[in-house]
Amino acid sequence: MNDIIIREHILKSGKKSYEYRFEICPVGGKRKQVSKSGFPSKTAARKAGFEAQALYYNKGTVIRSSKMSYSDFLDIWIEKDCKISLKESTITGYQKRINNHIKPALGGMNIHSISREDIQDFINDKFDNGYSRNTLSSLIGIISKSLNYAADNGYIAVSPAVRIKIPINRTPAVPTRRVERVNIPEEAVFNILQRFPENTSPHIPILLGYECGLRIGEVFGLVWEDIDFENRTLTVNRQVQWHQDELLSKEEKARNNGSKLCGNGYWYFANPKYNSFRTIYLTEHLVELLKREHEKQLKMEDTYGEYYTHYYSKYKLHFSAKANPAESINNPISTGKSGFKVNFLCIRDNGTYYSSRSMQHVSRLIKKEIYENFSFHALRHTHASQLYAAGVSEKYISERLGHKADHITKDVYIHLTDRARTNDIKILDTLYTEK
């Protein structure tokens, strides 16, 4: 290895500062050097130079800083890597897990001092506190991706996030936390639809959740071009998400997200979750309902005239069940009369967008008046359970719901309905009746 050169600099204040410098491999036949200044003494500069040189010849890179917390690095990783390669909703999920779990446990550590044992202990502790395998897998993924980026970009020599395991041969100290999967009784659904009948804004979104199993973002991302009346199909081409105003405080975001009080926030189109583009079959009565709604909207547009609200997207929408690279990035929606016109399916009589945020108020009313365990996502669970109880194949249900893996349908979404339970009891009686 070449010698470490130490240079002295006189600062404007009159104080001395020291710099190390050493040669690395030539690039294009030209000599290259690495240097770093700001050290208070020759000894400190020489020591740092030897460490950097050793790391370079061992790993081919020079470590950027020996004084950086993992917390600060995670902020850099989100800004420089995640924001150029991931959807905003994914980044929001990452930041939530980082702030709630990773930073409190590992954030204060120097990024150079984090070991595999530290990460494994962190995962073991979460397991013992009842966190699910999905949560643990997500935490491992975030830590691994961030530290791989750190190693690839010279923040650390190698990533310690290797062979991190989720415990399997032990019992957690706290029972595993489970999200209750609600199956809404048929009587409750009937009462909900009576409370919000046809020609009220919530009626169609509720039916699309209940009879089609759509996610809430998919429902409110629908435009009329997604509906094929002749073939009785609906194509899921996108979802809609809300972009939060970065200038707002965390409390303001939580309080006003999706409302007029959310500053410069806006709705935008994005690909469906897991890129689950799909075309699904509609019941005859739902098709007829959508036809009546479409005709009503056209009449209301004529009635309101210039006072009718129209929406536009920055990029052109696509209407076939396949990914469009242009829509993989955020596609903002506005009323600015520029871009491409958007014919939303879920709107009020005056053309204003009826959004998923509006459904939050409806959900509160349903919980208070009809069914206390209601949520919009429970409609999706109920749809899957009803199809399964009726004998529909798991493969078809999985395709209809747009799952990334077939086993999710059975493990998460299919619940035993009252109808299925009654049928199963009848089968048992038939099997074991004395002959």
Image: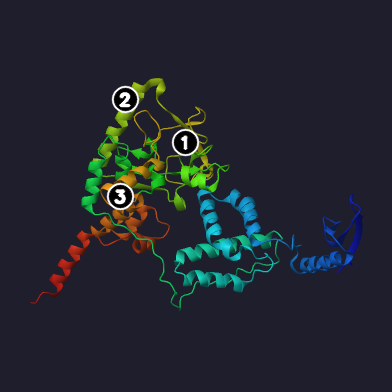
Of all residues, the one furthest to the bottom in this rendering is: 169
- Crowd around label 3: few <14 · some 14–19 · many ≥20 (10 Å): few
**Residue carrying label 2:** 299
- Crowd around label 1: few <14 · some 14–19 · many ≥20 (10 Å): few
Q: What element carries label 2?
A: helix
**Number of the label disc, if any, that sits on residue 367:** 3
Circle 2/circle 1 CB separation < 8 Å? no
Report which quarter residue 113 is drawn in: bottom right
Q: Nearer the viewer, residue 392 or 90?
A: 90
**Residue carrying label 1:** 260
The span from disc 3 to disc 2 (Cα, nearest Å) is 34 Å
Residue at horizontal 22 percent and vertical 42 percent from the top: 194
Q: Relative to 416, does residue 270 appear above or below in the rendering? A: above
Circle 3/circle 1 CB separation < 8 Å? no
The answer to whether residue 63 is visible is: yes
Residue at horizontal 50 percent and vertical 49 percent from the top: 89
Residue at horizontal 46 percent and vertical 75 percent from the top: 168
Quadrant of the frame with the C terminus: bottom left
Q: Which of marks 2 and 1 is nearer the N terminus?
A: 1
User: Left or right: 365 with respect to 96?
Assistant: left
The span from disc 3 to disc 1 (Cα, nearest Å) is 25 Å
Q: Which of 27 and 157 is in front in this view?
A: 157
User: Left or right: 222 with respect to 428?
Assistant: right
Identify the amino acid type marked 2: Lys
- Crowd around label 2: few <14 · some 14–19 · many ≥20 (10 Å): few
Quadrant of the frame with the N terminus: bottom right
Q: In the rendering, at what x and y percent does residue 338 appear?
A: 52, 28
Identify the amino acid type marked 1: Lys
